[in-house]
Amino acid sequence: PTTDETILSVKGLEVNFDGFKALRNLDFSLKQGELRFLIGPNGAGKTTLLDVICGKVKPSQGHVLFKDSIDLTKHQEHQIAQLGIGRKFQAPTVFSTLTVFENLALSMKQQRGLLSALWAKTTSEQRERLHLRLDMIGLQTKAKERAGSLSHGEKQWLEIGMLLMQEPDLLLLDEPAAGMTDSETEKTGELLHEIAANQTIIVVEHDMAFVRQFARMVTVLHEGTVLREGTMQEIQNDDKVAEVYLGR
Ligand code: ADP
């Protein structure tokens, strides 16, 4: 649930790609425990904003404060992951020859390196954590199946589960329901709300039906800056948003 504590505060962000301003004077902030949907037309800067937060892209101006005191623009991508920010891209990157359980176990222990993670014994406390996550992502009955045999939707859930094993405080998800069947999409929306009970999430989403069904708070980007921010209802009834985004 949303608390009063600000977990992320972006101020005056500017990103230049060869003279083209992908982000301009962008301000954005997020409370702990929020599930925030980031929408906007193609090229609005949504992916670039996530890229700046996770350290993949460096801004030419502005700062990104995480938990009040950490300026993420001063850290490298791998450090930011260790600070508790998990990024999931659209394409699933599970290890297809390992089982679902092994994939989860591996990401839980990956801090110590991939190879030692493969050999490290799993403690009973760790097994318990693994089973809790398996339940959460709905793959308890598939724990012993190879990840390669899962459906597209199940692979996406597994990957979200793998991110969660690293206990991030902030998750950045890029179109988590893309390519899913209707029932998988539904389950994904529910999963996001379940995760937001303990963690903060930013979701970049193009599927407006998904946004309408699952979003409460929405930020609309347009031409590299925030056009509007509000509840789904406010956004839906906003003329400016309709004009630039829905093409009305
Ligand atoms: P969105 O995710 O909202 O569709 P992006 O953040 O991907 O938008 O892109 C914002 C703008 O920046 C687009 O015009 C895009 O073409 C441009 N852009 C993104 N990445 C690069 C890059 N690496 N080099 C040059 N231009 C880029």
Image (tube, rainbow, N blue to C red):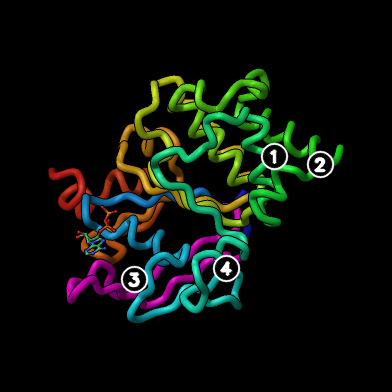
Residue kind at label 2, given as amino acid type: Lys
The boundaries of the magenta stretch are 5-33
Q: Of marks 2 and 3, which one's residue comes earlier in the chain?
A: 3
Residue kind at label 4, given as amino acid type: Gln
Q: Residues within 10 Å of mark 2 (few under 14, many from 20)?
A: few
Q: Residue at x 55, y 40 (%)?
A: 160
Residue kind at label 3, given as amino acid type: Leu
Task: Write down the quadrant of residue 179 in the picture.
Answer: top left
Tag 1 residue: 105
Tag 2 residue: 121
Residue kind at label 1, given as amino acid type: Ala
Tag 3 residue: 26
* Mark 3 residue's CB less than 8 Å from ligand 1: no
**Between 112 and 125, which is closer to the camera in this rendering?**
112
Q: Residue at x 40, y 40 (%)?
A: 91
Task: Write down the quadrant of residue 237 in the picture.
Answer: top left
Q: Disc 2 versus disc 3: distance between alpha carbons? A: 46 Å
Q: Disc 1 versus disc 3: distance between alpha carbons? A: 38 Å
Q: Residues within 10 Å of mark 1 (few under 14, many from 20)?
A: many
Q: Nearer the viewer, mark 4 or mark 2?
A: 2
Q: Nearer the viewer, mark 4 or mark 3?
A: 4
**Between 10 and 216, which is closer to the camera in this rendering?**
10
Q: Is residue 230 magenta?
A: no
Residue 79's mark?
A: 4
Q: Secondary structure at mark 4?
A: helix
Q: Secondary structure at mark 3?
A: strand
Q: Residue at x 55, y 27 (%)?
A: 147
